[in-house]
Each structure stands twice: as structure tokens, then as C-alpha cells.
Amino acid sequence: RSAASPDRQGQDAAAAAAAQPWTRNARHMMTYEDFIYFMLSEEDKGVEPSLRYWFTCCDLDEDGRLTPGDLRFFYQVQAHRMDCLGHEPISFEDILCQLSDMIKPATPGVILMSDLTRPDVIHIGGALFDVLFNLNKFFMFEQRDPFSERQKREDNFECDWDRFAFFDYSRLAAEEDAEAADGDLMEVVDAGRFGWITSDGEAGDLDSIGSSL
């Protein structure tokens, strides 16, 4: 392997894995289309195009296989992040054992795309890439609740992307409502500070008070 860091090689691999190659002269930049494809692949890892996207990112030697060496190369970045945040890093060997038990690859020690797209694995195979690339989802994977996982499988959403879009839109709408309410409150406070508020909620001014006395 080259001396480039896992972060840098991961960025280059993501560029190569995109639906269309990133601008050749600006490999460190995403176009809007690149970003949309990345977000779809990040938030819905239970479908084959997303799994193939991340598989390509990890398959740096392009041999169509993910070996423990490939996975360790990226996991060392996650271990460093955990250490920086004050968490005790989980050993790579323990993680590899968990992932092997979950995916059950046809050839022990080697993960192929066909292993991840088996009907009994495709809805959970994305956890492999959460472990390697997304620290928050990695912690959720480690602390997952079987009851919550069952509820997730039985909800009304057809895929993880629909679930993400619904909850994120609800969050943004709630934030906008809160900001609007704060703005209305500040207008009332300002009106009360510099004048007066009538019983019907209308603001008056001090001159009006004087003329009414």
C-alpha cells in the first residue's frame, strides 16, 4: 500500500466509487450530484448500490475481496477517533469476530459482495461500513437494543432512506417552528420594553398612554 493515510485513501476511493467520477482536477471536492449519491449510500446501507459504493471504497487493491488487512487499514482511524474522544478503543480482533459472526462469509476471512447481498444479510451488512466510517453509527451498533431493532424492522418505512428523510425533515420543521416562536416572543418583549401591550395583544407607545390620561 502507499504511504497515504487511510483518510486520504478513503477520500480517493469514495471519489472513484461515486456514480460518476469526481472532477479530475478537484478530487478533494464533491459536486452536488456526488453529495446526493454519497448521502443515499450513507443513510441507506440496506440496498445493493449503497453496499457496492462502500465495498469499492474499502477494496483499495480492487481485487473484489475485503480481507482483514483491508478492514484493519480503515478501522485504525476509528480507533484513533475513539481514543481522542476518551473512549477505550475496541480491539480490531473483537470487531472482526462480531462482523464475521454477523455476515458469515462463504470463505472465512474474506468478504465478497455476494456475501453482503445475500437475502439474510443485506439488511444488516451495512453495519460493516458503519464500523469503519461512521463513529456515531458504530457506537449505536455496539449498544444496539434488540427490541428497538425489531421495532425498526416492523415500522411503516420501506427503507432506511425513507426513515432518515422523515425524521430529519421533522427535526428541521421543529427547529424552524421554535425559531419562529422565539422571534414572535422577542417582538412582544421589545414592544413591552418600549411601550405597552393592550389586552388584545396590540402594542402601544408611551405618548398614547400620556394622551389617554
Image (tube, rainbow, N blue to C red):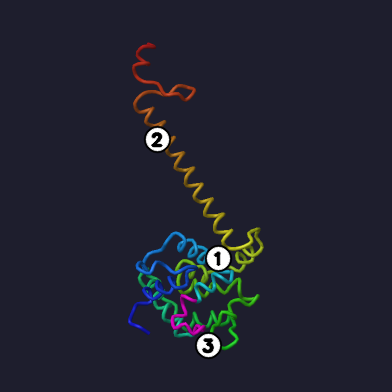
Please tell me whether residue 24 is drawn above or below residue 205 in the rendered image.
Answer: below
Within-10-Å neighbours for mark 2: few <14, some 14–19, many 20+: few
- Choose between 6 and 80: the one closer to the eye: 6
- Is residue 158 shown left or right of residue 22? right
* Residue under label 1: 44
- Is residue 138 shown left or right of residue 159? left
- Choose between 51 and 182: the one closer to the eye: 51
- Please tell me in which quadrant of the rendered image residue 101 appears: bottom right
How far apart marks 2 and 3 lie (CA) works out to 62 Å
How far apart marks 3 and 1 lie (CA) works out to 26 Å
Residue at 42% from the left image edge and 37% from the top image edge: 183
- Is residue 62 shown left or right of residue 191? right
* Residue under label 3: 109
Q: Is residue 41 visible?
A: yes
Magenta part of the protein: which range? 56-66
* Residue under label 2: 186
Q: Amino acid at mark 2?
A: Met
- Please tell me in which quadrant of the rendered image residue 114 appears: bottom right
Could you tell which of marks 3 and 1 lies nearer the N-terminus? 1
Q: In x, y percent, where is residue 207?
A: 34, 16
Q: In x, y percent, where is residue 171?
A: 51, 51
Q: Amino acid at mark 1?
A: Asp
- Choose between 189 and 48: the one closer to the eye: 48
Q: Main secondary structure of the magenta part?
A: loop
Please tell me whether residue 167 is drawn above or below residue 63 in the rendered image.
Answer: above
- Is residue 128 shown left or right of residue 186? right
Residue 173 falls within the magenta-colored stretch:
no
Q: In x, y percent, where is residue 31?
A: 42, 61
The mark closer to the camera, 2 or 3, is 3
The mark closer to the camera, 1 or 2, is 1
Residue at 53% from the left image edge and 74% from the top image edge: 52
Element type at mark 3: loop
